[in-house]
Image (cartoon, helix red, strand yellow):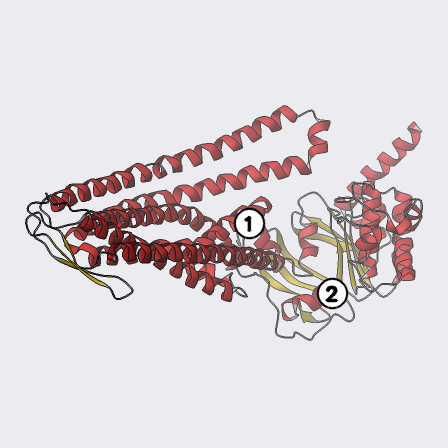
Amino acid sequence: MIRKLLKGGKGYEVQSIFTVILVLCETALEVVLPIFMSNILNTMQLFAVDETGAGLTAALTVYDFQGHTGLLTYPMGTVVLNNADILLNTVYTYGILMIVSAIFSLTFGGLAGRLCAVAGAGFSKNVRHMLFTRIQGFSFANVDKFSTASLVTRSTTDVNNAQNAFMMIIRTVIRAPAMLIFSTVMAFVNYKEMAWIFLVAIPALGIIMACISIKVHPLFKAMLKRYDKMNADVQEDLVAIRVVKAFVREDYEDQKYRESTEAVRQAQLKAEKLMILMNPLTSCVMYGTIIGLLIIGGQEIAIGTMQGGTLTAMMSYCTQILSSVMMICFIAVQLVMSRASIDRIFEVLETDSSITDGEQKDKTVNSGSIDFEHVDFSYSDNADNLTLTDIDLHIKSGESVGIIGGTGDGKSSLVQLIPRFYDVFDGRILVDGTDVRDYSVYNLREGVSMVLQKNVLFSGTIRQNLLWGNENATQDEIEAACRAACAHDFIMSFPNGYETDLGQGGVNVSGGQKQRLCIARALLKKPKIMILDDSTSAVDTATDAQIRKGLKELSADMTTIIIAQRISSVEDCDKIVVLDDGRINAVGTHEELLKTNSIYQEVYRSQQKGTVEEGGEC
């Protein structure tokens, strides 16, 4: 996990390394403070012995940092002091050292905190960018694997958890073990006869922490899946808010969201039930250790083998050691939570796109001919569950081809194979006589423009959306494409014309206007192959005819594939493909199919009947 996290710190190595160094310096200075205090207390205790101190027979030579030496003896109630000012020298010297150490420790801690914050913010920026870049490179099959809500959660909540883990690793994870090691060493240096108690407490805390962490990790993973479901419900409700209100289903959506949030709460509760055990268990070990030190230290002081200052130092080291162990427990909790998020992040980062560049990376689309050679396709890569079966179709450069069929017959699946949104299961597709898998993905898709069933516009002006097709397009080229798509007139009806702000997702325009803007955007790309996937369904038949006429006039040599439900949208095409249950049922012109194909005849009659009836009512 740490190895994965450090990948995100690229570019912030200096801040991360200096954070570690400063934390070590801060910790070292904190650890020496109890020794300074111990010397002060021990010296004061020695000078405080009065003439009735019977039984004190120990002798101690005290050294201060200015070279003075004082010999203190305890011969049956008598205190002899050879250098009376040693007390003040010792107190002043160690007192100043404590103040200086505390100031430097505070300074190092503050600098470490600032550098850690900078490195953490940089880490989250890097990881979000890596995630976004990886998602942009995904094929449709990869995107199908991860839900949109899940990808949003991974890019937000999971990255925040990973950022917290990274900041802990370069600061707290260094500080807590360093404090544990330094304090344990100093405890043995200070009074090794008592320090053994830490060798019992530390492993006990470690075992508690390890057992709980192992149990709780899968629970946090389950909780994050519940988060994905909750976010998916929110996203779906916001996207379909107009439908929700139109059908007065607010109460239903509210109940569905309550169930999602309750599932998250239950998952959190299940994990927290284990996590809350860590604090009381570690507290029991900590307070048990303190009690043990007091019992042993009290006996040592009573028999004269230990001074009060030494016991105070041992208590300080006990607090530091056990606090650092409890901090390690807390870190473990956070890292367990973060580990689930980090696994989810790197599940995305380590997923390779199922669509990769071919060997002919310099090959470009020049003519626009398309050949399907016995193509089978399955979304699940399963031969027993084929969406398209044995598609054998040949389209010449510059031809216009119509595709009709019922819902679920594979019309959209067929055309999505051309720009390699998906790869074929069997057979092959040739563009300009070259297998699409031999092109670079960029060059192949640069030669193809596709207007999808769902028309998507982005926040910004009309001009900004149109320039997606060609960022270097001139105003004349923009207007020509819009006229061909029958969009220029309604654009100019807006007060700001092409500078009209569309709002998020194009909320300021109708469905038909949105379709025409998407067609104009695709035309600006000047592709060799244009695919219109039921992209004129929201416009009337007259506008539909004008758009088809504009397409021919703007680019006569462009290969055009039109998927439509209305026969009137495809009847002028050079040939029409009739799909039935994922297979090609017939290929021919409008006249040929009217004579020979029963499916086409049935569709034509039903649409003509509807037109006549509609005209009669008028």
225 to the left or right of 497: left
Most foreground residue, 518 or 395 = 518
Q: Is any atom of residue 167 visible in this view?
A: yes
Q: Is any atom of residue 595 visible in this view?
A: no
Most foreground residue, 568 or 345 = 345
Residue ID at (63%, 67%): 437
454 to the left or right of 359: right
Q: Secondary structure at mark 2?
A: helix
x, y percent for residue 444: 70, 66
| Disc number placed over residue 446 in the picture, else none | 2
Quarter of the figure with the N terminus:
bottom left
Most foreground residue, 603 or 70 = 70
Residue 471 is drawn in which quadrant?
A: bottom right
x, y percent for residue 482: 88, 54
| Disc number placed over residue 187 in the picture, else none | none
x, y percent for residue 126: 56, 59
Closer to the chain start, of discs 2 and 1, is 1
407 to the left or right of 180: right
> Could you tell me how far apart the alpha carbons at marks 2 and 1 are, in whole angstroms?
26 Å
x, y percent for residue 142: 57, 55
At label 1, the amino acid type is Phe
Query: Pointer 1: what residue?
Result: 146
